[in-house]
Image: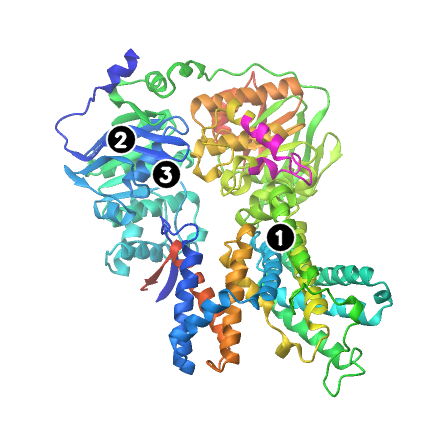
């Protein structure tokens, strides 16, 4: 409590004027309170991080600033004047532009066409040539090449996010709202975006950076505001805080659960849960993404696959569960050949799968938690016993602390982290013999992420299931794995046992 | 210059009953204007025709047929499978029932024959729809044109049968089949000249079955999820191909049952050519499905309104108020309004210079 009081004081430097102030904002959703009397100020020329655990209300707050939600109570002031922001159009008129984690571009149009469209929609008139020039100049400046005349579907995620940012600049943004817009970018490219943000702030723009990652906030933000359960815990300048302090603000007493120590080794059984021999799998672009991978995973063992995104991990995992055709090589599940078997045949044998695009391959967002459980063939018969599904849903909601008004709420109304919890808890439930996962703790806050890793490890140990975890987060790999395979350009370049694994060496092999 | 539809960041707040309600009102108003322009029908007379159709007993049979077909379409539409082929599926149902009634020995046991007529009709309607399902599931061929084209193939197959092998012996020069035996005709409700017990039972069963299927079976749940996220379904280990085929087959089977009811309860024979004898219920039912917002509980309500519009058009034509097919003016205007409202509640139209 004392901690809380200290932070309530605003450390804001008085020489910068506030651009946007939010006073006493409250927002209720059916069955839950998203924001409860939030005060929040963003100054000119600052990068202000908004941190909080999953479901703390971060996204709700920026959606209010961007006019997607209308608050139940409270006021918004822009440059000291009261503003009624009822639509994104009005927000943009006030110089506030949001970029979310999911690109909103139209795939079949070119980059330039997309940007012109975005401009005209809000009444900005400009010449096509000028937009093209702007894209070329800016992308060169940032260091991520984007051709204005490419169709958007050909772009990588990083390029799309850059286009979104450029769109915001063209809309004359004074305040950028970044809702996990850079959280999921590959590490190297993330740095370029940090610089972009910094430059924007130095030219007296303001940035609200929403993230659930403490280190990201500490790396770029000038000030940090922490939300918990819809309330402001406090606002602190970066220079005055350490990760531990921020963590305490985010999780209170639960912050002591955060540890990056290696989890205790599990005891692998004799039998092999998964045997992969000389596996070749095609990628999306017509060349081999997996090039002759051979691995053996014992029952009861957790194997981590380290590697930079795009080195074949995704394709390897999809091939195991049957979502991608194997060109050559064999996959055996407890000695049974499952090469090129259908997903239904693989999954029904007790294989849990946490995919890399949870909203696409994991859950159906329009449907409820109950329905997302009942859709799995391994959890229901022809007739659905909704009573037992409800009990199961309640159990998972409790166990994983999923913040939802009810098990019947469509999943799309949950926060990003809570959506991930639904997926992870379901897949842990159905993984009776094998769990394959890609970034299993993506979008989860630290406390939940560590809880999930512990549950996975324990499940491997006690139930003797095999676990294969690919992750772009090396901390995660180091914490959870009994053995670590490093993937680079579609090949496993080396396998370490957890005791001999050295971070530097792994990183070197990843970028080699 | 390119014209594109852009998804709104924030959909227009037109939830629940607003869109179906508004499209009925606006659609009828547009119809009065159109009918005035093309055949000088007094708008007030048009409106009074619609009003009196709402309480006319003559709409009951159409209402029941559209309810059955609405239920049929919902099975597919809930999975974003656009079965435009109920028309062909129901007519093949009619043909199958005709075959049982005229060319087998079953009518000697009337109860068995009636059941057999409905079941064969369902089998044939289902199989017909399954063809489009297989093409969609295995070759990714869009089911919309396939089911649509198959309606005409169904018409022509039946036309061939009626002119050739099925041509009746006592037809007084008309090209049509013989009348089905009296004992396999459905039983009229007391006081009605068109509505039978059997068609009522089929409609109630169709509603209950589809409601139960969508709500309490994993098949129904998966069909609903197929409409929003087929990728998640596949990754969960659901055989999506089989699911698509099953959904279309069930949809076609229910439409086929309506075809049997149409024969045994009302038409009693098939006349050549189908395309000028059909009431086009298979197409009209698409409007029923949309106005119900794909909620099975709303299907009877939507079917009631659409059958009233249908009847209003027919009475205007009979009374000589309108020379055109007023029915299709109503149906078309409402469906068009509905579609426009739906699209613009979620999308906005943009023009790109370029």
Magenta segment range?
A371-394
Q: Are discs 2 and 3 both within one chain?
A: yes
Toward the front, the furthest residue is B191
Q: CA distance from mark 2 to mark 3?
A: 14 Å
Q: Residue A243 at what x, y percent from top left? A: 35, 19
Mark 2 vs mark 1: in front: 1
**Looking at the image, which is closer to me, A505 or B11?**
B11
Q: Quadrant of the C terminus of chain B?
A: bottom left
Q: CA distance from mark 3 to mark 1?
A: 46 Å
Q: Is residue B1 magenta?
A: no
SS at mark 3 in the image: loop
Q: Is residue A17 visible?
A: yes
Report the side of A390 relative to B26 (left or right). Answer: right
Relative to A293, residue A108 above or below: below
* Host chain of mark 1: B
Q: Residue at x 18, y 25 (%)?
A: A12
The residue depicted at 40 percent of the width and 73 percent of the height is: B32
Chain identity of mark 2: A
Q: Find disc 2 in the rendering and name its residue.
A: A48
- Secondary structure of the residue carrying tag 1 is helix
Q: Residue at x 45, y 62 (%)?
A: B339
For the residue pair A336 and B313, the one nearer the viewer reads as B313
B348 in relation to A458, above or below:
below
Judge whether residue A220 can be spotted in this image: no
Residue of label 1 = B207
Q: Quadrant of residue B111?
A: bottom right
Q: Of B172 and A325, which appears nearest the observer?
A: B172
Q: Are marks 3 and 1 in contact (CB under 8 Å)?
A: no
Residue that numbered label 3 is attached to? A181
């Amino acid at each position: 409590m004392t901690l809380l009081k200290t932070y309530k004081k605003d450390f804001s430097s008085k020489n910068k004027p506030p651009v946007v102030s939010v006073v006493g904002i409250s927002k209720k959703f059916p069955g839950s309170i998203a924001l409860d009397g939030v005060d929040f100020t963003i100054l000119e020329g600052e990068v202000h991080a908004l941190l909080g655990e999953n479901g703390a209300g971060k996204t709700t707050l920026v959606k209010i600033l961007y006019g997607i939600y209308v608050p139940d109570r409270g006021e918004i002031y822009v440059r000291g004047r009261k503003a009624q922001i009822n639509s994104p159009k009005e927000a943009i008129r006030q110089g506030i532009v949001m970029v979310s984690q999911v690109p909103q571009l139209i795939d079949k149009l070119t980059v330039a066409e997309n940007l012109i469209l975005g401009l005209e929609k809000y009444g900005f008139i400009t010449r096509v040539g000028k937009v093209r020039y702007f894209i070329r100049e800016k992308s060169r400046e940032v260091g991520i090449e984007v051709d204005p005349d490419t169709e958007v579907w050909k772009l990588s995620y990083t390029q799309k996010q850059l286009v979104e940012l450029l769109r915001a600049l063209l809309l004359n943004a004074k305040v950028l709202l970044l809702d996990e817009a850079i959280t999921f970018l590959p590490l190297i490219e993330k740095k370029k975006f940090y610089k972009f943000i910094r430059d924007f702030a130095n030219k007296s723009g303001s940035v609200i950076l929403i993230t659930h990652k403490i280190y990201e906030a500490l790396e770029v933000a000038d000030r940090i505001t922490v939300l918990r359960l819809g309330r402001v815990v406090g606002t602190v300048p970066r220079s005055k805080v350490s990760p531990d302090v921020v963590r305490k603000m985010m999780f209170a007493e639960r912050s002591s659960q955060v540890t990056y120590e290696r989890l205790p080794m599990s005891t692998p059984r004799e039998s092999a849960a998964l045997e992969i021999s000389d596996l070749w799998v095609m990628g999306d672009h017509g060349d081999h993404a997996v090039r002759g991978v051979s691995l053996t995973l014992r029952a009861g063992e957790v194997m981590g696959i380290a590697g930079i995104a795009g080195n074949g991990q995704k394709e390897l995992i999809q091939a195991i569960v049957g979502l991608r055709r194997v060109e050559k090589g064999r996959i055996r599940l407890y000695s049974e050949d499952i090469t090129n078997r259908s997903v239904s045949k693989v999954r029904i044998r007790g294989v849990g799968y946490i995919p890399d695009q949870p909203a696409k391959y994991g859950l159906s967002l329009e449907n409820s938690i109950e329905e997302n459980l009942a859709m799995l063939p391994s959890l229901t018969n022809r007739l659905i016993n909704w009573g037992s599904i409800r009990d199961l849903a309640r159990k998972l909601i409790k166990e994983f602390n999923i913040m939802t008004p009810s098990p019947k709420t469509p999943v799309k109304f949950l926060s990003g982290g809570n959506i991930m919890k639904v997926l992870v808890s379901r897949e842990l439930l159905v993984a009776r013999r094998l769990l394959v996962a890609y970034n299993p703790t993506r979008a989860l806050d630290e406390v939940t992420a560590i809880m999930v890793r512990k549950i996975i490890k324990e499940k491997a140990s006690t139930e003797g299931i095999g676990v294969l975890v690919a992750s772009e987060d090396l901390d995660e790999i180091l914490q959870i794995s009994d053995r670590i395979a490093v993937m680079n350009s579609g090949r496993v370049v080396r396998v370490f046992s957890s005791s001999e694994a050295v971070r530097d060496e792994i990183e070197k092999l990843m970028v080699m | 210059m390119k014209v594109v539809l852009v998804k709104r960041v924030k959909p227009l707040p037109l939830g629940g009953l607003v869109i179906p309600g508004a499209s009925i009102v606006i659609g009828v108003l547009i119809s009065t204007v159109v009918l005035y322009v093309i055949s000088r029908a007094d708008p007030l007379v048009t409106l009074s025709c619609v009003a009196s159709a709402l309480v006319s007993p003559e709409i009951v049979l159409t209402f029941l047929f559209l309810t059955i077909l609405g239920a049929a379409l919902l099975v597919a539409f809930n999975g974003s499978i656009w079965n435009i082929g109920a028309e062909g599926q129901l007519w093949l149902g009619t043909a199958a029932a005709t075959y049982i009634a005229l060319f087998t020995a079953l009518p000697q046991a009337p109860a068995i024959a009636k059941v057999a007529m409905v079941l064969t009709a369902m089998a044939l309607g289902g199989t017909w729809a399954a063809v489009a399902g297989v093409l969609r599931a295995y070759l990714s061929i869009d089911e919309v044109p396939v089911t649509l084209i198959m309606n005409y193939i169904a018409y022509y197959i039946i036309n061939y049968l009626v002119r050739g092998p099925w041509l009746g012996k006592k037809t007084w020069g008309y090209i049509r089949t013989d009348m089905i035996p009296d004992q396999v005709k459905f039983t009229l409700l007391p006081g009605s000249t068109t509505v039978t017990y059997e068609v009522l039972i089929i409609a109630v069963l169709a509603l209950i079955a589809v409601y139960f299927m969508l709500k309490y079976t994993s098949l129904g749940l998966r069909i609903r999820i197929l409409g929003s996220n087929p990728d998640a379904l596949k990754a969960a280990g659901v055989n999506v191909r089989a699911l698509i085929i099953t959904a279309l087959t069930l949809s076609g089977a229910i439409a086929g049952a309506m075809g049997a009811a149409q024969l045994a309860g009302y038409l009693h024979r098939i006349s050549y050519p189908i395309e000028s004898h059909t009431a086009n219920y298979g197409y009209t039912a698409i409007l029923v499905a949309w106005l119900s917002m794909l909620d099975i509980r709303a299907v009877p309500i939507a079917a009631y309104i659409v059958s009233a519009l249908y009847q209003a058009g027919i009475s205007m034509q009979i009374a000589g108020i309108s020379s055109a097919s007023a029915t299709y003016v109503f149906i078309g205007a409402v469906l068009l309004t509905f579609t426009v409202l739906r699209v613009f509640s979620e999308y906005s139209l943009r023009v790109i210079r370029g």
